[in-house]
Amino acid sequence: MFFYLIAIVVIAFDQLTKIWIRMNVAIGESFQLWNSPIIITHYENSGAAFSSFQGYGRWFVPVAIFVVAFLIYYRKKEGKRVLLDVGAGFLAGGAIGNAIDRVLFNQVTDFITFGYSNGILNLADYSLNIGMVLLIADTVNTELIQKKKRKLNLGGNPLNQALLVIDAQTAIIDGDGNVETGVFEKERLINNINKVVQNAIDGKIPVVFIRDTDVAGGEGGGFEVHPNINVPQEAVVFNKAATNSFYGTPLLEHLKELKIEHVVIMGCKTEYCIDTAVRAATVNGFDVTLVGDGHSTSDSSNLTAQQIIQHHNRVLHGHDNVDYFSLVRNSDDDLFQPIHNNYR
């Protein structure tokens, strides 16, 4: 929200001030702004910073497009942080503001100097500088928070957490041409699983993959975890024969040995092994976060896959067994910062 709002405001003020300068101040004309150290000097820059690459203004338009696209991607990858959103908004607004000038005029209107400074800038330039400072501040702040979490044993595997990826097997996800028809939005599922797995790796959170031996007869490529899913080298893999991932497997013993308190669950299929895993985990003494956009299934004879997913996200959000309960959150959330205690 802040990102788009700030970018729009920056673009609007930048363009309005440039229009006023072009209409009211001759090129080369200067005047002091009230009694301040700000000197207004109309200058048309047909190049880049420090008047370099003169005459090639439009060459920098693709750079601005790349910057804005990268900022949108980076925000999505990093998640919601105020400093990141505000800083990216200033950067995007500044990049677009100057790009508009270059597209229309092959040059940028500059007009602001401070005191005896030789540099002439505009509001878009200052916005770019502010954005860079805020992004650096966000990076430093995020790293300090992570260090504090690690120090308090809240990061690293501080809160004793684990990621369970259940039945993310090739034959289930892609279909086997026989029993399995493939799951709903499989590319999105794979991307979201990989995103959360990477977050677990970054946070030193143990990852456990569960495979169902009924899938593809328990052998071959169809039985394996989908090849597009990142299975960390240090991940533990358990096989199960039942719907319940805790039944007949070392999973519970493994989690207890690691003193796990909170598990994040993803995988397939929603109404079978995922639903059962969430409920069984709460019974076995774990708080659960079900990744709402990190599990999937296929159509049944009565409901579409999307309806099944939506139904289980609603039912399992707040499901409890007195002392332990489950919440549903999306893959973009900070899943390894559980919020269960906010509701106890």
Image (spheres, rainbow, N blue to C red):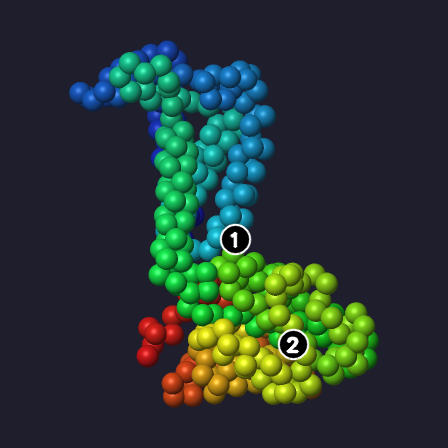
The relative height of residue 177 versus residue 74 in the rendered view (above or below) is: below
Which residue is at 74% across, 83% downward? 214
Which residue is at 41% across, 68% downward? 159
Label 2 or label 1, whichever lies nearer to me, is 2
Q: CA distance from mark 2 to mark 1?
A: 30 Å
Indicate the position of residue 49 as horizontal and vertical percent values.
47, 22
Q: In what element is the residue under mark 1?
A: helix
Q: In what element is the residue under mark 2?
A: strand
User: Which numbered disc, 2 or 1, marks the residue that appears first in the sequence?
Assistant: 1
Which residue is at 41% across, 42% downward? 135
Circles 2 and 1, Cβ within 8 Å, touching? The answer is no
The relative height of residue 73 versus residue 103 in the rendered view (above or below) is: below
Q: Amino acid at mark 2?
A: Phe
Q: Is residue 129 visible?
A: yes
The residue lying toward the viewer, choosing from 122 and 131, is: 131
Quarter of the image where one finds residue 334: bottom left
Label 2 packing within 10 angstroms: few (<14), some (14-19), many (20+): some
The residue lying toward the viewer, choosing from 289 and 16, is: 289
Q: Which residue is mark 2?
A: 238
Q: Is residue 9 left or right of residue 56?
A: left
* Residue 178 image label: none
Q: Amino acid at mark 1?
A: Lys
Q: Is residue 107 visible?
A: no
Indicate the position of residue 333 as horizontal and vertical percent values.
46, 63
The relative height of residue 193 versus residue 3 in the rendered view (above or below) is: below
Indicate the position of residue 108 as horizontal and vertical percent values.
46, 23
Which residue is at 29% across, 20% downward? 114
Quarter of the image where one finds residue 302: bottom right
